[in-house]
Amino acid sequence: MDEALAKALEAESWAPEQARNHYLARELVLTWIRNQQGRPSRNLADLANRMHLV
C-alpha cells in the first residue's frame, strides 16, 4: 500500500481538487482506512482529513 499511497499523494500534488473529490479516489482511501490494523499512517490520515473522510 505504501507505493499506492505515494502515487495518490503525487496525484493530489498535481490536481488537488480532482484527487480529493474523485469518487474512486475517495473510495480507495476509505478502504485503506477501514482495512488498517491499528492506527493509519500519518500520510494516510492526513490525506483522509483533506478529503473530509474522517
Image: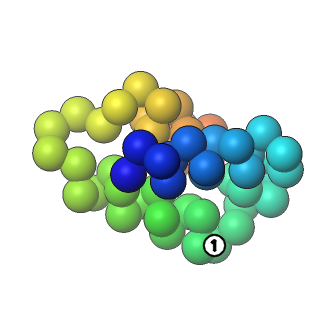
Toward which corner of the image does residue 50 lie, by quadrant? top right
The residue indicated by pointer 1 is 23
Q: Is residue 48 above or below residue 41?
A: below
Q: Is residue 35 above or below residue 40?
A: below
Q: Position of residue 27 (x, y in %)?
A: 49, 68
Left or right: where 22 falls relative to 27: right
- Residue at image location 84% in from the left, 45% down from the top: 14
Left or right: where 43 falls relative to 12: left
Q: Residue furthest left?
A: 37
Left or right: where 25 falls relative to 18: left
Question: Is disc 1 surrounded by few (<14), some (14 to 19) or many (20+) residues within 10 Å?
Answer: few
- Residue at image location 41% in from the left, 44% down from the top: 2
Badge 1 marks a residue whose secondary structure is: helix
Q: Residue furthest bottom?
A: 24
Q: Position of residue 41 (x, y in %)?
A: 35, 31
- Residue at image location 70% in from the left, 67% down from the top: 22
Can you say which quadrant of the picture contains the C terminus? top left
Q: Residue furthest top?
A: 42
Toward which corner of the image does residue 45 lie, by quadrant? top left
Q: Amino acid at mark 1?
A: Tyr
